[in-house]
Amino acid sequence: MTHPCRISANPRLSALQWLQLFLLSVLLVSCGGGGAATPTPTPTPTPTPTPVLSLPSRAIGASQLAVIVAAGDPLSESIASYYQTARAVPAANIIRVKLTTGVDAISASDFASLKAQIDAALPSTVQATLVTWTAPSRVVGTCSMSITSALALGFDPKYCGANCATTAASPYFDSESAQPWQDHAMRPSMMLGASTLDAAKALIDRGVRADVSLPAGDGYLMRTSDVSRSVRYTDYLALPALWAGNSGLQLSYIDNSAGAASDSISGKSNVLFYFTGLATVPSLASNGFRPGAVADTLTSFGGYLPSGNGQMPITAWLDAGATASYGAVEEPCNWTQKFSRASVLIDQYYRGATLIEAYWKAVQWPGQGLFVGEPLAQPFRDSPGFALDAGQYLISSRALRPNSSYTLEYRTASSAIWSVLASFTLKRAQPQSWRVPLPPSDAIQLRWVGPCPANISQQCTLSTSG
């Protein structure tokens, strides 16, 4: 019997019949089937997703701040409790220590024990600290350091000294670091600086109100008739022109070096920055300070709390409505590096840093200086954006460092080499948005490159897509 799936030769078939049989054999399936063959579909290639990334944050948050409490001191305990609630500081970040309060100074040996207590209790995630007492405010050994600088840097005579000595620099000065503990092995510290609970609450509330307020405000940069205390004026000169045209900040340089006018401002209602040089600044109460305002004077003993050692204590700025200030706890002489640099502070603050970060980054030699205020005030908080929009990348940020190079780069699956998609450089801190074409369709990864957090002279990858 002929197999049903086999075609037998038949010499009597015509050529046309042979052709028909051949075509039929092509359509038949193998012997196990019997139906027509189903064509195998061509697989549709899966498109490579367009990569996106998140721009990095530049600021310390409440979860990274530790609140240091003098255990059993009613005022310190009350301030800490109010601050924890106002700022949602985690319970693990409330550090209680044994400390004798009410005395102006603590010895270097006693401070070593205090710092050991604090260091042992701090979670590794903490990047900065807040002190909730006003005395002691300085650490005394062979020389004096402020308690905030000693907590940040450790008590070390290289950071203080007599006879107008130069002192060691802070590695944190004008850096791009948002993690000073990881980047520089230091935690900047600030003292709240309030002597009553009501004053503390008012200060804390000002700091909270400042957050993301993007305030329009005025900055006053004073060169007074006090020549020795006005040495910072050279930093002030270029700032009004640099910031001209800004939608919210107006800086004014006031030169009274000849003594023909007033050495202070009065009756101003919109003060955001006030930097001057006097032993005592008059008319503070006549001015209105914006929430988040920063103010200080270059003089010898402003941080020598509570008295100021015969000069105006820096807490007077807080009493007048400022949110933070700074001053020296021992004779620093008039080294500009030992006081805040307005150009750095305004830039860092305006680009989104918290108050503690902006102030600390503005002082190059901070060992003899006390920082007071509400550390987390952040009027110009940056909320960077990176999104796909109408076939392009839409990038927005206010955090780019002026006169520094940033690049958006991509790589493909077939290469380990990164190619530049776009580059960015700004002359002045400002909120900015850019539209950038998408990379080639075979791009699989993006990275954001800019000044390194710990060394701005080098370039680092700041963010990478998944």
Image (cartoon, rainbow, N blue to C red):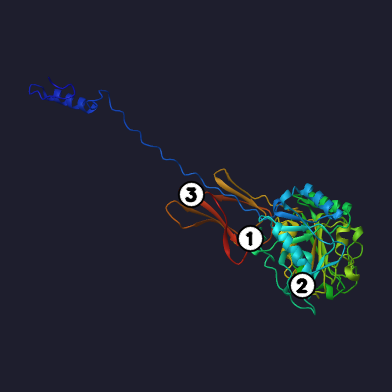
> How far apart are the two marked residues, 2 and 3, measured between alpha carbons?
49 Å
Q: Secondary structure at mark 3?
A: strand
Placement of the N terminus among the 4 image quadrants: top left
Q: Residue furthest bottom?
A: 163
Q: Quadrant of residue 148?
A: bottom right
Q: Which residue is mark 2?
A: 336
Q: Which residue is mark 1?
A: 182
Q: Residues within 10 Å of mark 3 (few under 14, many from 20)?
A: some
Badge 3 amino acid: Ile
Residue 47 located left or right of residue 396: left
Q: Given contact means CB atoms under 8 Å apart, are the residues at marks 2 and 3 in contact?
A: no
Q: Earlier in the sequence, mark 3 or mark 1?
A: 1
The residue shown at (68%, 63%) is 186
The residue shown at (85%, 68%) is 304
Badge 2 amino acid: Thr
Q: Earlier in the sequence, mark 2 or mark 3?
A: 2
Q: Give whichever of 254, 309 is nearer the camera.
A: 309
Badge 1 amino acid: Gln
Q: How far from the left and from the top, in percent, is residue 336?
A: 77, 72
Q: Which residue is mark 3?
A: 444
Q: Of discs 2 and 1, which sits in the foreground?
A: 1
Q: Of discs 3 and 1, which sits in the foreground?
A: 1
> How far apart are the two marked residues, 3 and 1, measured between alpha carbons?
30 Å
Name above or below for residue 207 compared with residue 143: above
